Structures are given as C-alpha cells and as structure tokens.
Image (cartoon, helix red, strand yellow):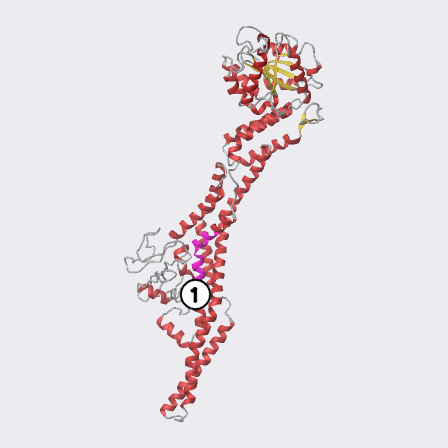
Amino acid sequence: MAEGSGYRWAEDGGRRAVRGGLRGRLDALRELIALSRTRLDGRALESAGRVLETADERFRLSGEHTVVALAGATGSGKSSLFNALAGANRSQVGPRRPTTAEPVACVWPGSRPGAEGLLHRLGVPSHRRHAPADGNSELRGLILIDLPDHDSSATEHRAQVDRMLELVDAVIWVVDPEKYADAVLHERYLRPLAGYAEVMFVVLNQVDRLPGDAADQVVDDLRRLLDEDGLALGEHGEPGAAVLALSAATGKGVGELREALGQFVAERGAVDRRLAADVDAAAERLRSVYVAQCPVGLTEQARAEFDDRLAEAVGAVATGRAAERDWLRHAERACGTPWARLRGRRRGRGSRWENPGSGVGTTDVGASRGATTGVGASRRGRPAAERAVKGQSCAGRGEAGLTGAGSGPTGTGRAGSGRTGTGRSGVRQGLVGQPGASGHLRAGGSSAGGAEPAVDGRAAARPVVEHAVRAVAGEAAHGLPAPWAQAVREAAERGAYGLPEALDKAAAAAEESLRGGPAVKPRWWTVAASLQGLLLVLQVVGVLWLLGVVTGLGDGTDWISGLSPAVLGLLGGPALTWLCRAVARGPARRYGQDAERRLRGAAAGCGRARVLEPVAAELLRYREVREQYAVASGV
C-alpha cells in the first residue's frame, strides 16, 4: 500500500479506518453541525450532513475496491471504451439513442471480497454486473461503471447520472471531437465539479476521425476549456484532471488509459481524495455563515462604555455628589456651633458647607437620583421639601434643578426629586410638566390638588439602559455572519429583560447603605464638638460675668474678665467651624467618590451578569465553531 494513502488496513479484512487529516476534518465537520443546530437553519447544514452520511457509508464498505464511472454525452463512445477496457462486449453498443438505459458494472476482483456491497449501494442490477474477459491483474480492485448519457432525452437517465456521480470514487469523462465544448457538459458538470479534479479523467475519444494534427489541436483546445473550468493540470504539476486522447474503436491510446487507471487504483487514495473534495465543497457552501468579515469580539472600550452608560442610568455621579453633601451635612451637625445648629433646625436651612455654585440645599442619596433610576426619593430633608412647596428651583445655578412636593402645607410629607447631575447626558428637568409613563408629571408642574407628585424616573432610565444594550450588542455583533450576529443580539435582548429593575434594586441597596451618613464617624468630629461645647461655655460665662457687672452684682471695673471669654467663645466658634469646613472637603469628596464607585460597580455587575456574560458566551460559541470550521475546511 502506498505510504501516502489516507487509509490503513483494519483487522476486519479489507475495510479501512480513516486516518490523518481526513479523520480530523470529518470529526470537525460533525462537531460543527452539532454546535450549529440551534443557530443555523437546518437547510444550511443539510448538505454537510449528507457528506458525513456518505463518508460513514463508504467507510463501512470495501476499501479494496475503487469505483470509477464512465460518463459522457450521447454518442461519445462511453460504452465502446467500457468494452475496450473490459476486453469484451459487456455494454451494449448501437446507433439507437440513448443506448445505455441502466448502469453496467465490470468488476476486477481484489484480494478480498466486498464489491457486492458497493454495487448494491450504487444500485447496479445483478444482471448488469460483469467480470473482465482477461482478468488483468493490472486493474485489480477496479469497479468500472458505464453510466447512462448525461444529456439523455430520458429524464430518469439524467437523474440516475446525477445520483451516481455523488457516490462513485472517480469519474472518467468521455468526450468526442464534436461535443467536447458542449455548454451543458461544462456548465452543469465540469465547472461545478472543479474541486474534484484530482479524481477526474477527461478522455477525448474518436481521435481516429481527426485528420493529421487536428487531434493535437482539439486536445489543446480541450485543455484550454478545462483550464477555464478550473480542472486542467497546472504548469508545475498542481492537482488537476488527467487529459488523454484515444480511440476506443481502434485501440489507440487505450493502453495508456489502462496504465493510468492501474496506477490510480493501486494508490488506493481515490476515496480519500473524493471525500476530501466533498468536505471542501460543503465547507465552501458554509463559508458565508461561519467566516467573519473582520476580527470580532467585545473590546475593553466597548465594555467600559457599557459600564459608563449603566452608571449613568443609575445616577452614580449624582449619588456620589449627594453622598458627599450628606457627609458635609453630618460633619456640620457634629462640628458646627450650637447656635448654628439650633438656628438651622429652626429655619430649615440646608448645609452651608456645600459648593457655593451648586445652589443645592439639604438633600440625600434617594433624592439625588430619583429622576435617574426610578427608585424615587425615599426620604428628603424637610427644609428642601419646604422650598419645593414654595416653588423654588435651583435649575441652571449649578449641578441641577430640584423640584419636589410636600404632602401638606407644612411640607413634612415625602417629596419627589427631578434632579439630574452634571455628569449625565440627559436634558435637565424643567418646570414644564411632561406626561410620564404612568401619566404623572415627569418633573415640575402641579397636580390638580396643588401638590407636585413624586417623579417616576424609570421613563428616563429605561431609554438609557436600552441604548446601552443595543450599543454593546451592535459592537459584539459587528462583522459576525448574519446567524451569529442575530444570536448575539438575541442573547443581549434576553439579558436586557429585567435589567432596569435589577439596576433599581442595586441603586436602592446603595441608597440604603448610605442612610444615616458615614458608618464610622471621624474622631476629629468628637474633638471639634467638644471644643465647640467649651467655646459655648466660655460664651455663657462671659455673658453672665458682663451681666453681673452691669447689674452691679460684680466689680464694675472688672468687666474685661467677662468680655475676654465672651469674645473668645463668640469668635472661636465660627473660626473652628470654618476650619472644620476646610478640613472636611477632602474626606467628603473621597466618601462621595467611594459611594459613586460602589454604585458604578453594582450597576456594572448587573450588566455583566445579565448582558455581557450571555453575549460573551455566544461569542465563545462562535469562536468554537469557527475553529471547527477552520479544521473542516482544511485551513
């Protein structure tokens, strides 16, 4: 057996097991079909499935024999050539057309039996199976089939030819000087079968009818046509169809064909090459659904943009700034002068420690992102609610506008918020009421009862989430073949279902964690509060001393002893408050940034679990099938 053969003898006697590259390609094609059944239309995989069935069936049959078919047009001399190779009249020859109505077989016995199974697979009737006259060992293992005419006027004959061409191991195309350039032959058979050139012979018969050097000219023209069909041998011996010229009537050139066939059969590689060509053809048909137009996958930039959009949807920036303001407010309560705290509670004023340009009073995390996540404001400071009831708005004065509504004249009820942070790309909520998803006013405006309803931010958040999902799905699907791009988009859409609600829960959890201010109070707050208490005591002592001097209860000349502690306490308290305010900016900013980072991370986690991971799974599946396709196609 030739060293380069794709088969090896098996212990079952004559049947062979696949080895080398063909086994890997067939296994890859089988795995490719299994991975793609839920992604591709069954019709797209049908031809590949037939290739596997054909290969499995052929491998179960004899590896000792090579099936070669004689195919050609009416009057080309197929049957004459068949008889010349068989050494006797085994196939009917005559002027009636079509002459061959059924396939005729001639079997050169091999060292092991097995031809019967192949002939049964081909559908050759028992009475049409013959043995050669001379029993020439040169063609041992050859099963030669004389097919009906491919251009027969009988439709069933053409259908029989097409069926058997898919089952035989090799084909000898017999042409004659009159019809070698027939368009039907080239356009219907030779050109589409260009990938099978290694298992194909093209024989110019009836050269005895050509005078002089006309035979050489016809052969040259035939080679030119075959080259246009993609079948001719290359200049440097590249694989291609062997071209011979002969005359079955006179026997000229028949010996050369017999010798070429003997070498071809002895190599026992026709089945491998035929099935490899089948796999090539199946892979080429599937190319459009497996080969991407460009490198595919989710880039880090696309992931980062997706995370940024989700952070925008939950109002991470606004939450961080609100947390910073909360920290400052708690610091003011702890470190401010007792008189300022009392005055602040009475007047309902917000923190004076916030950025002067923000124009925002006392607020909290829930209020800061009520128009962003749909969670709404779960609690609001009373002073801000009172200002909202009075119709005050801070829109255009810094970060955002605040609108709210109290449940009564005192403003002690819950209030909604229409705030949007400076880091958001959405438009600011104005004072003009717009109908929201629930029929309420989206921001500002008055209800029929005079109260302003809480803002439902989901109408503002859902478009942001949907846009984020569409953008990341489009980026992931870019360049993918249509079926896989659709699978990626569907995975993203499935994950997006319920994502806004999950983001709302994440935002609500972040809000809950920030309630009550920082979990650990800085020690310097206690020190500052103690100093403020000490300064308050000095103020009280100084004032009482001065009152005693004025009323005559004390020494009238000792008023300086009372004025000094009073002035120290009066000036020291605001000075300490200013110092604490300067010291608090940095920690407050870090606290806000940490709150923003946690909420951003929670939103990114929701998006990753619901959208990015399913999309990544689809991309991974595509990479797997792409690798299997590369193996199956022999790349």
Quarter occupied by residue 357: bottom left
Can residue 174 be seen? no
Q: Nearer the viewer, residue 519 or 472?
A: 472
In this view, 247 is above or below 625: above
Quarter occupied by residue 400: bottom left
Tell whether 214 sits left or right of 405.
right
Please name the predominant secondary structure of the magenta segment in the image.
Answer: helix
Q: Which residue corresponds to the image point at 30% horizontal and 63% vertical from the top-left?
A: 391
Residue at the disc numbered 1: 325
Q: Position of residue 238 (x, y in %)?
A: 62, 25
Q: Position of residue 520 (x, y in %)?
A: 51, 68
Tell whether 140 sits left or right of 602.
right
The C terminus lies in quadrant? top right
In this view, 287 is above or below 592: above
Mark 1: which amino acid?
Answer: Arg
In this view, 368 is above or below 578: above
Q: Nearer the viewer, residue 540 or 564?
A: 564
Taking the view exactly as shown, the residue that stands out farthest to the top is: 95
Quarter occupied by residue 190: top right
Residue density around tag 1, few if under 14, some if 14–19, many if 20 or more, within 10 Å: many
Please tell me whether residue 375 belongs to the stretch shown in magenta. Answer: no
Tell whether 417 sits left or right of 152.
left
Q: Position of residue 220 (x, y in %)?
A: 57, 17
Q: How many marks?
A: 1
- Write the start and end of the magenta stretch as one range: 307-326
Q: Of helix, strand and loop, which one carries label 1?
A: helix
Can residue 469 be seen? yes
The N terminus lies in quadrant? top right
Please tell me whether residue 317 belongs to the stretch shown in magenta. Answer: yes
Q: Position of residue 13 (x, y in %)?
A: 71, 23
Q: Which residue corresponds to the image point at 41% horizontal and 50% vertical from the top-left?
A: 464
